[in-house]
Amino acid sequence: MNKIVKGRVYTLIGAVSWGLSGACGQYLMNDSSVSPIYLTALRMMIAGLVLTLFACWKQPKQFRKVVKSPKTMGKMLFFGIFGLMLCQLTYLFAIHSSNAGTATVLQYTCPILIVIYVSIKEKTVPTVMEFVAIFCALVGTFVIATHGNPFNLSLSPAGLFWGIISAFTYALYTLLPGKLIQQWGSLVVTGLGLLSGGILFYIGSASWQYTIQWKPYTFIAFIGIIGIGTIFAYTLYLDGVSLIGPVQGSFLASAEPISSVFFSIVLLGEVFQMIDMVGIIFILIAVYIITMKEDIQEKYMQMNH
């Protein structure tokens, strides 16, 4: 298996694993009465510990430099709280208020928010492709939220609210660690961010007060969201992106909402109407357009160097 194929396979499996985490989270919150707050803290701490140990083993020099620098560790903690924690917490609240498939699709309007943010920051007008992507994302969100009737929400107001908020926090999670990742690498930043943010959130939210109703599949669901959907997913995805680059990586990551809808139907018995699928397709088209635009820009820059 050559490097490119290997990278694509790793990235795709990582994205599909993230999709599984949503369905597992939905089961834990709905069937085992696990609080989204407790689940976020536990997920971050356990996954963060494993990924941090992995980073320590794989990138020992960078890891030692980071932990010896209070300033850098402070930046890791800031990313852990305002990037990773907010992203995961709002996503789980969105699932809790709707379902894993809908929440994941709404979260994937994030690239459009980033385009709007960059346009405002750089004081530029979005391109025609970007306007088309924004239009598709808005249409997709409208269709999912209303089923085409603007006077009737097809999902709860809380589900729509948290879904859109999770897109904003996902954008924050994407934009915050840019310089940190360039300097220290994705694995070190993700591991330490998850661990430090998870510990602080666990203490700050007094997560030990929450209880779990243990059922036959509760432990398996925990393995699904933490083991497969976080540790395994992050490890494979980051390895894959290191082989194929962020543009192809972000495109293949769009398998996450598709797999999330699939797992919601197969594992949880969720029912999606045809009009829901239309909305999902519109949002995926928007993600595809933004990704292809980045790909064209990257190839153009390579040709001119």
Image (cartoon, rainbow, N blue to C red):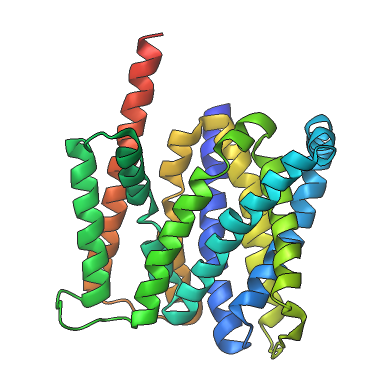
Please say whether residue 242 is visible from this viewpoint.
Answer: yes
Work out whether residue 94 or residue 247 is closer to the camera in this orientation and state it: 94
Whether residue 2 appears in this view of the structure is no
The image quarter containing residue 288 is top left
User: Which residue appears at 33% of the width and 43% of the height?
Assistant: 115
Position in image of residue 163 (x %, y %): 40, 69
* Position of 102 relative to 180 (above/below): below
On the image, the x and y values in percent for residue 177 come to 58, 42
Determine which quarter of the picture holds residue 70: top right
The quadrant in which the C terminus is found is: top left
Is residue 219 or residue 136 the one in the foreground? 136
Residue 2 appears left or right of 231: left
Q: Residue at x 42, y 58 (%)?
A: 168
Pick the quarter of the image with the N terminus: top right
- Closer-to-camera residue (49/18): 49
Residue found 31% across the figure and 53% down from its top = 284
* Percent position of residue 303, x then y: 36, 12
> Would residue 227 appear left or right of 100 to someone viewing this image?
right
Q: In this rendering, is residue 55 above or below 65?
A: below
Q: Number of labelled discs?
A: 0
Using the image as rendered, state which of residue 88 and residue 281 is in the foreground: 88
Q: Quadrant of residue 45?
A: bottom right
Going 58% across and 56% down the picture, which residue do you hit? 82
From this viewpoint, which residue is outermost toward the top?
A: 305
Q: Look at the picture and state if 115 lies above or below 218.
A: above
Question: Residue 260's spot in the image, x, y percent?
Answer: 46, 65
